[in-house]
Image (cartoon, helix red, strand yellow):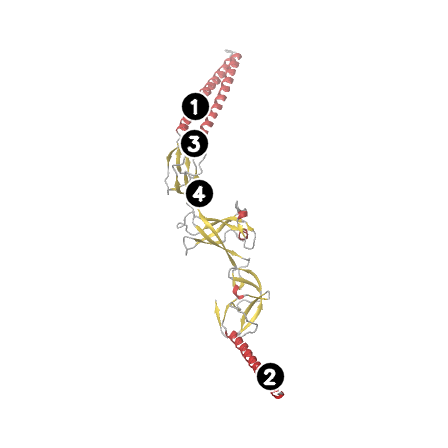
Amino acid sequence: MKKKAWIWIASIVVLLLIAGGITYFVNGESTRVVSDVMEQVPVTVQKASERELVESILVTGEIVPESEQKVFLEADKGSINEYKVVENQAVKAGEPLFLYDSSKIDTEFSRAVRHRDLTQKRGEIEQNQIAEVNKRIAEAKKNVASEEGTQDEVNQLNNEKIQLEIQYEATKAEIASAQDEINEIDTRKKEMTVVSKIDGIVVKINQNVAQTETSTPEPIVHIISSQPYKVIGTMSEFDAVKIKQAQPVIIRPKVYKDREWKGAVETVSQFPNEDGANGGEYAGGGNVTMYPFKVAITDDTSELRQGFHVSLEIQVKLNDSEKSLVIPHTALVNEGGVDVAYVLVDGMLSRREVQTGGMSDEWMEVVEGVQLGEQVVITPYEGMYDGMEVVSYDEVE
């Protein structure tokens, strides 16, 4: 009985040893196969290069004219007598748009001119009278010298002259007052003709605006500038601090899916728009303030229209250097909180700890860890290690 027990024990031990051997062989072989497969996986590399490091800021906006003029009804000027323009007509600055009925002002103007002219004639008579008295005074003085006249006659004529001069001064003041009145009426008369303040196109004429005591909120005539269109919109405080005047802009109208217009940043306001404090919520949490901007369109704008909505891509340089040493974002892996890149050197991978700088949408600036022209793996995968042999690879420009 004891003999049979020992036989069973020996058999179990042998079986365990065989199983262990098989497991060891399989696991070891599997590890070697996996390692071989990893070494045979092709990788893609790209040379570290120098590029201008730019970031694309995306915002939206609306196409607007360079300037516009909206003319509203002024009830105190009376009714409109005549329109001088029609819709879609091109106008120059200073050209008449419409005329208010100026018949009453014309009558008032004529009356003021007549009054001034009559006063001027009276002044001319008074001047002639003064000149005549001066002659008489001179004659009287001669008579006194020849003892044919008296000094009293000279004094009397001098008094008469003084009275005439006082009267003439009053007349001159009356003439000046009359001219001031004419100038004031003439100004009001000119204001009865409403003119364009800009070179542009008449886009709207509304002849049916009701006349009220106050100006209506709807314009009678609306003119937009004939200058190239611009784009206005708002951008967040995070973008506004990066934008500078004259930075290039790519403009993509939503109605033209595959077309682009070039432009340049004209202004970014230093002050938020009226509801800027409630402009939205930042992705990182908290509110964000919005700032108005304006972009000049440098390409031909004849195919664009006021009111088109557009998306804008603004190219922003991320540092003062003309070019920076960069690698693609995809080349970096994080290993234990450290940025790492793998560089292909003589068919072997070299693990590099990388110090980075600025980054754009596609590129990451390398400050330390990779040299210009080195082949950096841009498709790293788990399991790569320093010294790993690379059998084949693809290189992209």
Q: Disc 1 or disc 2, which is closer to the eye?
A: 2
Mark identifier at residue 68: 4
- Asked which quadrant contains residue 333, the reply is bottom right
Residue at which label 2 appears: 13
Calculate the distance from the C-alpha at mark 1 to the C-alpha at mark 2.
Answer: 140 Å
Calculate the distance from the C-alpha at mark 4 to the C-alpha at mark 1.
Answer: 42 Å
- Work out whether mark 4 precedes mark 2 in sequence or the reverse, and give the earlier one: 2
Q: Disc 4 or disc 1, which is closer to the eye?
A: 4
- Circles 4 and 3: CB atoms closer than 8 Å: no
Residue at which label 1 appears: 115
- Work out whether mark 2 precedes mark 3 in sequence or the reverse, and give the earlier one: 2
Residue 155: image location, x then y, percent = 53, 14
Q: Disc 3 or disc 1, which is closer to the eye?
A: 3
- Circles 3 and 1: CB atoms closer than 8 Å: no
What is the crowding at mark 3: few (fewer than 14 residues within 10 Å), some, or many (at least 20)?
some
Q: Nearer the viewer, residue 317 or 348?
A: 348
